[in-house]
Image (spheres, helix red, strand yellow):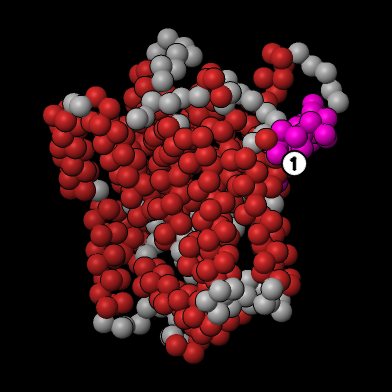
Amino acid sequence: MLKISNDLLRKLTIGILVLMIISIFFGESSSNSKEIGETIFWFHARAVLSFSMLLLLVFTISIVRTKELLINFKSRKDLLILSLIFISLVLGFVNSGNYGYIFQRMQIKVPFLILPLCASSLNIDRKGFQTILFVFMLFTFSLATYTFINYIINFDVINAAYLNSKVMPSPINHVRFSILLALATYSSYFLLKTNYNRFKYIKTVLVVVGMFLFVFIHLYSVRSGIIAIYAIAFTETLSYMIKTRSFKKGMSFFLVLISCSIIIFMFSPTLKNKVTNTKSDIGIYNSKGNANYNSLSTRLISYQVAIDLFKENVFFGCGLGDLEIKNTKLFKEKFPEIETPIIPHNEFLYYLASMGVVGFLIFIFCFFFPLFYNKNYKNDFLLMVYIVLFLSFMTEPMIENQLGVAVTTIFITLPLMIKKEERFQLFF
């Protein structure tokens, strides 16, 4: 076990966590094509994300004795229960024949074991947490700026793409990127209200970056990010009104928010085209038209297929290992016009279809336990993370890919690493 000073330990911990949160943006390639203005947009290297998590594990093991590490893990019930999401996957062997797919799921979800284990023995102070958020916010801002410049260069082509269920090229998958944009926007506000004062003009930087990211989320026009940022704004305002009893200020903010949204909509061609595309997509679904290459219609159909698979075995589902095979087969039988079947684009339905009521209830309990244990919902950053993740789970199989698992585990465990006596508890 390494013996290092507390100050060096603090700096190394923050440095590794900063590396890990930045490595998220290397976790996958963009889903966009060169047809809509994408050149060599971003260096894609999943190994960077895997390396950062491995580095965190090695660092933790090197500074904490194995026995102490396990004791700490056992004592942190919030983190221990969260890790059971990984362990619970063994239920997939109950009624599945395709063990390869189960092992693939387990490999993807290893961070649900590694990060809670490390977090139980690592502590960061308020300033350390704020510094991590600041770097994350600035890095997201730099990528958003680059994405915006690329959009301006390919203005007409990208605007037209939004009418065909596509979005502007981005460093990673557009859904995950929009969620990170929402979290980065909230981070700027969070740092303002927690008085982060790293340098002289920090407040100006936070305001400018926050406003740019807020506007850019609308310009980027991905439903997940827009819903997330308004859910955050609504929760923040409602909590402020309840805490201060300043209902007039709260209502005034709602009016300002609505006004800003209307103005942005009026001047954002991408948002207008996204609304047009969404209406068209819903119309195709309602009229039972050809849903092929229509993202929303295909997603809604995946919900129907998931429910049918769930009905095969209400208690244990159709089998985690067999889900992909049975899902594709049912798609081909009921919706042959769809060339590329997708897995259930709802994390909760994914668990219901693959592992039934038993697996679903275990997942729900393990996932939400950290939020309610010891009233952790009073930690407002953690609460906002859960709100964003919950909403994304409703429209995406968020934790069925490496990057989604990384985003979920990193942003849940980070606020839980803050020393108990220094945690931010601004709500309620």
Q: How many marks?
A: 1
Query: Amino acid type of disc 1?
Result: Leu
Residue 151 visible in rendering: no
Are there few (<14), some (14-19), or many (20+) residues within 10 Å of tag 1? Answer: some
Quadrant (top left, top right, bottom left, bottom right) of the C terminus: top left
From the top left corner, tell me how far across and down residue 17 is, in percent.
63, 32
In percent of the image, x 54 and y 42: which residue is there? 370
Tell me where the magenta segment starts and ends, as one range. Answer: 49-74
In percent of the image, x 29 and y 65: which residue is there? 277
Most common SS among magenta residues: helix
**Left or right of 426: which side holds 420?**
right
Residue corresponding to mark 1: 54
Q: Is residue 253 above or below residue 276?
A: above
Q: Residue furthest right?
A: 1
From the top left corner, tell me how far across and down residue 232 is, in percent.
34, 40
From the top left corner, tell me how far across and down residue 149 is, in percent.
40, 41
- In the image, 316 versus 255, the foreground residue is 316
Circle 1 sits in a helix, a strand or a loop, which is it?
helix
Q: Residue furthest top?
A: 200
Residue 17 visible in rendering: yes
In percent of the image, x 83 and y 18: which residue is there? 3
Q: Residue furthest bottom?
A: 333
